[in-house]
Amino acid sequence: MTKVITYGTYDQLHFGHIRLLERAKELGDYLIVGVTADDFDRTRGKINVSQPLEERIAAVRATGLADEIVVEEYEGQKIDDIRRFDVDIFTVGSDWVGYFDYLNEYCKVVYLDRTQGVSSTELRSEQARLNLGVVGSKNTLLKFIAESKFVNGVNIEHACTMQEKLDDSSISEYDYTEEAYLEMLSKVDAVYISSSPESHYTQTKLALEKGKHVFCEAPIALSAEQSKELFEIAKNNNVVLMESIKTAYVNAYSRLLLLIKSGKIGDVVSVDATCTSIRDITGVSSSELGHRWNSICGWGPTAMLPVFQILGTNYTHKNIISKFADEDKTYDIFTKIDFEYPNAVATVKVGNGIKSEGELIISGTKGYLYVPAPWWKTDYFEIRFENPANNKRYFYQLDGEGIRYEIVAFAKAVFEGKTNNFYLENHITECISSVIEDFYAKKDTTEI
Ligand code: CTP
């Protein structure tokens, strides 16, 4: 009996897949089909797969062509499978020519002609098209636009730029005025906002009221009331409002939360998060500093994220200690916030003007979780115990600082009409805004 094996993602199973499976089957008597696990696809940078593993397996099974289906979960598994199943022929489409020649050592390798004119990528892009406008400063937007190219179905053709123009002929640019912004809104389905913290609320509100989906950098508003209002408007107008904190959408970070919630380090008693960067503000006038991203707005949301996601938002006390660079006391070069909970504490240290070790430490009754700097864009963390022999290290794939993953999450929410964001729940956003509100209102604050 000749055994044949082939692998693929088989997202939105199409004619090209079926033709390949038919010809693979004809190569022998028994066909094994390997379907990639969701995690494995992410590791290989395939971030747009639209169907979960179970659905993709069911579709392959429904073709009636596979005698056996296996799940491909790790790099190098093909060799294991070929040996395990005593496979005679490995086959894939001609888009992989040469790539799998190393398997010739274990069995015969056959590349079959790829069917022209159809692919899962094209299907995904055709079905879902999100015309996304962007507003903000040049550097941030350029990075965001470059990352959006990894996300199927998201097109950016309109930008409202704050100072410098993008100088990209494929993008129509608008001035940074309310009138021009409204004109841009009329041309798009959704908008990404990364302007300045004091403008986020107004720009988000204008967009939501026009029925546009909004993806806004944190903080989306400078008060809890305003955040709440924005979510209300989004709900009433049936559009998606998502706050952008890259870390929330990073694989390693979501896994870390799951491990903590499943009790791996016991009861959490302390969360310590530090995020800092050096900013040269010499010679910048006091009034101009007031419009810069200070520490509380620039880093505060990211640093508060694990605190509120792990310990919740019902803290009993907090104390905000800041060091300011301007007379108006709006530009904090450093802020430390202590939170007290009935059974735990947390400390957040943020700085746009000082430097410290950007690590995250979550301490529990059985052990602690350590994420080395820069923890907010991590692909790695450790769980450490009293007995180092029990320590565990976790590695994940991280591409593009996490920006492409959050764009995928936003696009998915829009395409699937999902209004609740499980990566970053509304009450977490509202709580972050309320701390920033207290910072500006000088409530629970101390100055050094
Ligand atoms: N395949 C094919 N003809 C096509 C598309 C895919 O022969 N038009 C083959 C691939 O070469 C591979 C198998 O089908 O052997 C599974 O491919 P997969 O990567 O799942 O499908 P794609 O449509 O290529 O997916 P994507 O666009 O996401 O890369």
Image (tube, rainbow, N blue to C red):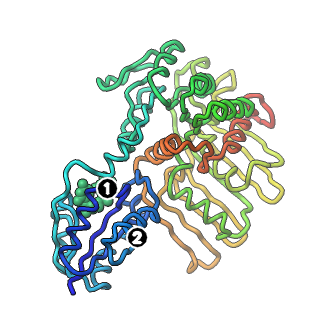
Question: How busy is the neighbourhood of tag 2: few (under 14 within 10 Å), some, or many (20 plus)?
Answer: some
Quadrant location of the C terminus? Answer: top right
Residue 296 falls in which quadrant of the image? top right
Amino acid under disc 2: Glu
**Would residue 357 be found to the left or right of residue 133 on screen?**
right
What secondary structure is found at the residue carrying circle 1?
A: loop
Helix, strand or loop for disc 2: loop
| Percent position of residue 4, x then y | 24, 77
Whether residue 198 is visible here, answered yes or no, is no
Q: Nearer the viewer, residue 150 or 115?
A: 115
Is label 2 or label 1 in front?
1
Q: Is residue 378 left or right of residue 74?
A: right
**Residue located at (73% from left, 66% from top):** 267
Q: Within the displayed image, which quadrant is ligand 1 positioned in?
A: bottom left
Ligand 1 lies under 8 Å from the Cβ of mark 1: yes
- Using the rendered view, name the quadrant where residue 173 is placed: top left
The residue singled out by tag 1 in the image is 14
- Residue type at mark 1? His
| Quarter of the image where the N terminus is located | bottom left
Residue depicted at x 67% and y 32%: 236
In this rendering, is residue 94 above or below 119? below
**Mark 2 Cβ inside 8 Å of ligand 1:** no
What number is the disc on residue 420?
Answer: none
Q: Which mark is residue 73?
A: 2
Locate residue 402, reporting x and y percent. Answer: 46, 48
Question: 168 above or below 76?
Answer: above
Q: Is residue 141 above or below residue 410?
A: above
Q: Is residue 117 left or right of residue 304?
A: left
What percent of the width, then of the height, locates residue 438?
A: 76, 33
Q: Alpha-carbon neighbours of circle 1 within 10 Å: few (<14), some, or many (≥20)?
A: some
